[in-house]
Image (cartoon, coloured by chain):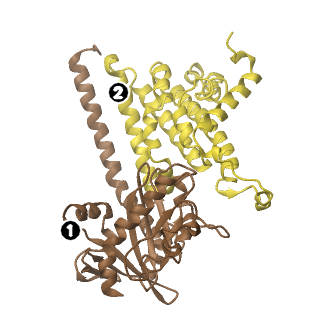
Chain colours: A yellow, B brown
Amino acid sequence: MSKTKERELLFSPKNIRLLTSPLGKENPITMQVLGICSALAVTVQIKPAVVMGISVIVVTAVGNLIISAMRNSIPNRIRIIVQLVVIATLVILVDQVLRAFSYEVSKQLSVFVGLIITNCILMGRFEAFAMANKPWPSFLDGIGNGLGYGIILVVVAVVRELFGSGSLMGYKIIPESFYNFGYSNNGLMIMPPLTLIIVASIIWFQRSRDKDLIEK
Amino acid sequence: MDRNNNIYIFIYSSVLVILVAIILTIANISLKPAQEKNIRIEKMSNVLAAIGIKSDATDAEKLFAKYITEEIVINSKGEVLGKFVAGKQVEGSGRAFDINIKVELKNQADSKSGKFPLFIGEKDGSKVYIVPVYGKGLWAAIWGNIAFKDDLNTVYGANFSHESETPGLGAEISQPKTEGKIVFSDQFVGKTIFDATGNFVSVSTVKGGVVNQTKIAAEHGVDAISGGTLTSNGVTNMLYDCLINYVEYIKKNK
């Protein structure tokens, strides 16, 4: 018993912070501006955005865990290569599983699952966190960052799908009578550049709420 | 141990990649059957969609077996190379379902040796003929299925898919059928691919409204997509290039 008291609790405040800070103050997309490329591409509809978010959570969490477990054995000179091998393996596994069990979504995500490999969030977390921390905090950090990424993706996707296609999760939300009065779906919403505007608006909102984030 | 020692690095990286290779091979082999099944099912529902039958992953195979009665393989001279009926090869060799049109179109262009698939089905008591088509859009491949009535001239239905056409513009070719709205593929219904004298003219996409055309008769044209001219041209070329290989067969079997 005394031994467990000395050790840090699994969900100590510090560990909880690892999980929650990427959702807000250290959000990978809005604060660190990483992973923008896929945010542009997979957010036309909510479903692919959710699947992409989950895929990234899995890859960051498991990747962080593996890298952290290996951190004392990785030769410093080839550490980036080792990190890439781990990421690539996990991404290929995710892609294969999606193809087998969620074919429709995997078709919509097409190359972007493969491009998780180039998602800067992964390399960033491996280098900045997993290489220097124990497996459990690294795992939490991975989940936190994946979630932070996924949440922004879903928020953007909600806006884009609602105004671009008039639906949410494929269900019609905007009633037919609106269309009869001359409302029409905004074609710009389904084009990638609009994501930048939405993401920028989120950043604007976040910074206006939290004065700490504003650079001097 | 010195972690920056060259021997250590060699051994470390070798072990790592071998491990990874083993993991990936196992994953690939164990998931392959499920992946291939998905691809087959998708192909089946695309063929069915051309004759207006909706199917999903659960019932596509059953519906395909129910509606598609015959699969035949032909060449551009109109000869039947293979016939596949109710799960059995009854004539020649080759099953229409397994043909890769992309490869066969290339064979046809190189050496006139292309083999082309034709699905024969039954809907509402009459025969329907379904021709899979494949071609180039603006950015990447486009493909689809076009179904003909039993006169092998009038289009019964069509559906198109694409790999990466521009969303909102060229990508509209694959807009799913919705009630009370005429989508791109709906326009093909009732068009004919032969003119009054029996010459092959295919169906083309035209700019500025089919009704205002003088060059092309209304029964051989559909409205192109505004802002999607290059994708629309791709559809026109795809239909022409694929259907022309069936002309001899159609003339023989009319």
Residue under label 1:
B113
In which quadrant will I find the N terminus of chain A?
top right
Instruction: Say left or right for B110 vs A37.
Output: left
How many residues crowd mark 1 within 10 Å: few (<14), some (14–19), many (20+)? Answer: some
Instruction: Say left or right for A173 vs A142.
Output: right
| Quadrant housing residue A211 | top right
Residue under label 2:
A82
Of all residues, the one furthest to the bottom in this rendering is: B125
Tell me what residue is drawn at x 54 percent, y 27 percent.
Answer: A34
Instruction: Say left or right for A86 vs B14.
Output: right
Q: Where residue B21 appears, x then y in whole percent?
A: 29, 40
Q: Where residue B33 appears, x then y in whole percent?
A: 36, 60
Tell me what residue is drawn at x 48 percent, y 58 percent.
Answer: B232
How many residues crowd mark 2 within 10 Å: few (<14), some (14–19), many (20+)? Answer: many
Of all residues, the one furthest to the left in this rendering is: B111
Q: Nearer the viewer, residue A73 or A110?
A: A110
Report if residue A22 is visible in the image. Answer: yes
- Chain of the residue that carries numbered disc 1 in the rendered image: B
| Foreground disc of the pair 1, 2 | 1
For marks 1 and 2, give the CA distance: 49 Å
Instruction: Say left or right for B150 vs B83.
Output: right
Determine whether the residue tagged by mark 1 lies in a helix, strand or loop. Answer: loop
Q: Nearer the viewer, residue B188 or B207?
A: B207
The total number of labels drawn is 2
Tell me what residue is drawn at x 55 percent, y 46 percent.
Answer: A51
Of all residues, the one furthest to the top in this rendering is: A216
| Residue B187 in the image: above or below residue A181 | below
| Quadrant housing residue B244 | bottom left
- Chain of the residue that carries numbered disc 2 in the rendered image: A
Q: Which mark is residue A16?
A: none
